[in-house]
């Protein structure tokens, strides 16, 4: 098998296979792979396959189209239709039920995981990319913590993953300024492992995945477990804090204004309330 071939087509995700390497490919290109409820279900189903198949020894997270992931699908509602008794969006439940199982599952998977990022990598899409062990980008990629632009806080584990990679100073810059970090700058900062030319990006990812799939899987798993214990020991607590903060902000005027401005494609007018 000399190229990745589709093994399972879910509604929003493709699961591909090449020998002992698997690829989980986001497949909502018309929406820039915005993450909705169906994608959560499909990602988790694909994760379960790669988790349970001993013949799969390395995993790549990639995306179809011109974006890796534009973040949560706000057009489907901030919480994807989940609401509290008062009618407000239940962001806390959405995070715990739809996002965290995928992100923590891949972070703790006892197999190497590589993120292959092309184009925009935004919001919770950035969390998905950074939950991998190795992250590589094409020249046209950029990374953006867009939460502040709609009056929210980083979630999906990004408040843990980003400072672990680039430190408090740069993580604060990303969280509070909400500006793009181009691929070359991301590599220079240490946010990602490297950048490859767009023309040879897929070939480089395929070569890396083949190397990992043919490597000492138990050694990789042990290294990952040790690193997780040292760097991400309190990850579950951090995810719970992110979700609680997000729910608190879901009732703010600034969040309502941020979403309205996003949908209308205009600059938000925040009041600090």
Image (cartoon, grey):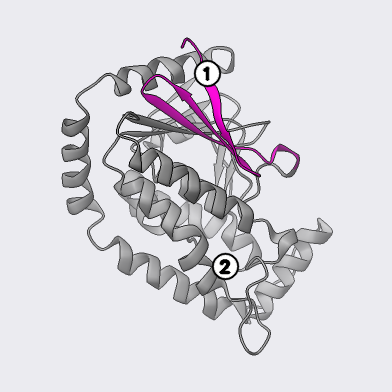
The tally of labels here is 2
Image quarter of the C terminus: bottom right
Q: Which residue position holds label 2? A: 152
Give percent across and percent down for residue 130: 42, 44
Give percent across and percent down for residue 227: 20, 45
Q: Looking at the image, which residue is at 73% across and 44% down? A: 31
Q: Is residue 35 visible?
A: yes
Q: Is residue 169 visible?
A: no
State the extent of the magenta-drawn residues as a range: 1-30
Earlier-in-chain disc, 2 versus 1: 2
| Viewer-side label of 2, 1 | 1
Badge 1: how crowded within 10 Å, few (<14), some, or many (20+)? some
Residue 12 among magenta residues? yes
- Kindly give the residue lying farthest to the top in the view shown: 2
Is 74 situated above or below 11? below
**218 or 5: nearer the viewer:** 5
**265 or 221: nearer the viewer:** 221
Q: Secondary structure at mark 1?
A: helix
Give percent across and percent down for residue 105: 37, 51
How far apart in space, not on screen, are marks 2 and 1 (Cα)? 34 Å
Is 27 situated above or below 238? above
Q: Secondary structure at mark 2?
A: loop
- Kindly give the residue lying farthest to the bottom in the view shown: 86
Q: Which residue position holds label 1? A: 202
Residue 29 occupies quadrant = top right
């Amino acid at each position: 098998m000399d190229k990745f071939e589709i093994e399972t087509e879910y509604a929003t995700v493709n699961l591909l296979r090449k020998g002992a390497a698997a690829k989980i490919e986001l497949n909502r290109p018309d929406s820039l792979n915005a993450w909705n409820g169906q994608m959560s279900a499909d990602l988790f189903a694909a994760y379960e396959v790669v988790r349970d198949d001993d013949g799969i020894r390395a995993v790549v997270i990639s995306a179809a189209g011109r974006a890796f992931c534009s973040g949560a699908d706000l057009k489907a509602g901030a919480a994807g239709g989940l609401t509290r008794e008062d009618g407000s969006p239940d962001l806390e439940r959405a995070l715990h039920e739809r996002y965290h199982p995928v992100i923590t599952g891949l972070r703790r998977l006892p197999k190497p995981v590589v993120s292959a990022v092309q184009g925009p990598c935004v919001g919770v899409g950035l969390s998905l990319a950074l939950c991998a062990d190795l992250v590589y980008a094409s020249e046209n990629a950029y990374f953006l913590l867009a939460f502040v632009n709609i009056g929210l806080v980083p979630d999906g584990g990004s408040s843990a993953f980003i400072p672990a990679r680039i430190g408090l100073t740069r993580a604060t810059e990303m969280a509070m300024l909400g500006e793009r970090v181009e691929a070359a700058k991301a590599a220079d900062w240490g946010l990602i492992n490297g950048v490859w030319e767009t023309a040879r990006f897929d070939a480089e990812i395929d070569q890396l995945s083949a190397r990992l799939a043919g490597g000492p899987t138990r050694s990789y798993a042990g290294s990952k477990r040790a690193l997780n214990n040292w760097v991400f020991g309190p990850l579950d607590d951090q995810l719970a804090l992110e979700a609680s903060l997000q729910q608190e902000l879901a009732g703010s005027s600034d969040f309502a204004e941020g979403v309205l401005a996003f949908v209308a494609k205009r600059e938000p007018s925040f009041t600090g309330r």
